[in-house]
Image: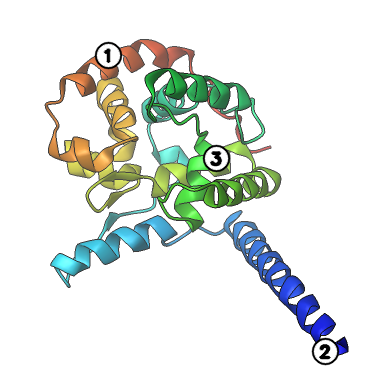
C-alpha cells in the first residue's frame, strides 16, 4: 500500500516538475534574449524542415538588423494593422480578444484572432501553429514572461526580425529584399503598409500578390499609420 501511495505521488509530481522545468527554460531563454539576438525560432525551424522535405539544400531568407535600421513606416504599419494598443497593454489585449470572439461567433468560424504582437512573438519563438487550449495557455505564460523581462521596444525589435513574411522569408530585412529589392530601412509608406497586411497569411500573399483584399487593406492601413504609437525608446 505504501508503494502504491509513493507511485501515485510520483505520477502526480513528475508531470508538475516537468512543466515547471519547461517554464524555467522559457524564462532563462527569454532573459538571455534581452541583450542577445535569436538566431532562429521554433517556427523558423518548422518551416525550414518543411522546405527541406522538397529540397534538402533549402535555406531560409533571414538577416537580423537593429531596430534603428528598420523603417518607422513599417513599425507604424504593423502596429496599425496588428496591435493598435501595443504600447499600452501588458501583453494581452483582453478587449481585442473579446471583440474577436464576438466576431467569430457571429460569422460561425474563426475570422479574427485578437492576438497581440507579444503573443505572436511568444508563439513564433517557442510554439507551433496548432490550435489548442493547452498551446494558448502556454502562449499566455510566455507572453507575460516577455513583458516582464523586456521593454516594448525590445519585444518589437525581435518580432520585426523573426516574423514570417513569405515562403521561407523571415524578418523585415529579408522581406524588404524579397518583395522590393530594398532594405528594411528604405521601405516607403505604401510598401510598409502592404507588408503589414501580409502578416496574417504571408505564404498565401507571397503567391497571390495581386489579391484585391491585399490592395484594399493596404489603403486602409496607409490611412491609419500616422495615428500609430511607437513604443518608447530604451531609457
Residue 228 - label:
none
Is 225 in front, or is 165?
Answer: 165
The reply to whether dot 2 and dot 1 touch (C-beta < 8 Å) is: no
Q: Is residue 128 left or right of residue 210?
A: right
Is 199 placed above or below 45 here? above
Compute the Cα span from label 3 to label 1: 25 Å
Residue behind mark 2? 3
Name the spot of residue 188 as percent of width and height, x first: 28, 25
Name the spot of residue 146 as percent of width and height, x first: 62, 47
Quarter of the image for residue 181 reads top left
Residue 193 in sight: yes
Residue behind mark 3? 118
Q: Work out whether mark 2 precedes mark 3 in sequence or the reverse, and give the earlier one.
A: 2
Residue behind mark 1? 219
The outermost residue toward the right is 2
Is 94 placed above or below 39 here? above
Amino acid at each position: 500500500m505504501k508503494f502504491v501511495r509513493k507511485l501515485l505521488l510520483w505520477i502526480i509530481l513528475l508531470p508538475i516538475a516537468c512543466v515547471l522545468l519547461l517554464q524555467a527554460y522559457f524564462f532563462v531563454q527569454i532573459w538571455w534574449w534581452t541583450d542577445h539576438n535569436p538566431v532562429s525560432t521554433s517556427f523558423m525551424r518548422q518551416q525550414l524542415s518543411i522546405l527541406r522535405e522538397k529540397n534538402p539544400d533549402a535555406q531560409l531568407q533571414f538577416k537580423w538588423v537593429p531596430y534603428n535600421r528598420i523603417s518607422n513606416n513599417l513599425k507604424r504599419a504593423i502596429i496599425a494593422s496588428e496591435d493598435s494598443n501595443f504600447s499600452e497593454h501588458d501583453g494581452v489585449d483582453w478587449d481585442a480578444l473579446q471583440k474577436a470572439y464576438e466576431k467569430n461567433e457571429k460569422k460561425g468560424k474563426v475570422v479574427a484572432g485578437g492576438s497581440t504582437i507579444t503573443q505572436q512573438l511568444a508563439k513564433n519563438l517557442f510554439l507551433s501553429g496548432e490550435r489548442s487550449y493547452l498551446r494558448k495557455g502556454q502562449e499566455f505564460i510566455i507572453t507575460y514572461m516577455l513583458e516582464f523581462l523586456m521593454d516594448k521596444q525590445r519585444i518589437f525589435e525581435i518580432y520585426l526580425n523573426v516574423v514570417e513574411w513569405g515562403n521561407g522569408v523571415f524578418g523585415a530585412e529579408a522581406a524588404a529584399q524579397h518583395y522590393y529589392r530594398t532594405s528594411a530601412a528604405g521601405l516607403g509608406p505604401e510598401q510598409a503598409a502592404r507588408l503589414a497586411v501580409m502578416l496574417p497569411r504571408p505564404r498565401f500573399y507571397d503567391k497571390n500578390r495581386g489579391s484585391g483584399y491585399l490592395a484594399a487593406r493596404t489603403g486602409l492601413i496607409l490611412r491609419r499609420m500616422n495615428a500609430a504609437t511607437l513604443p518608447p525608446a530604451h531609457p
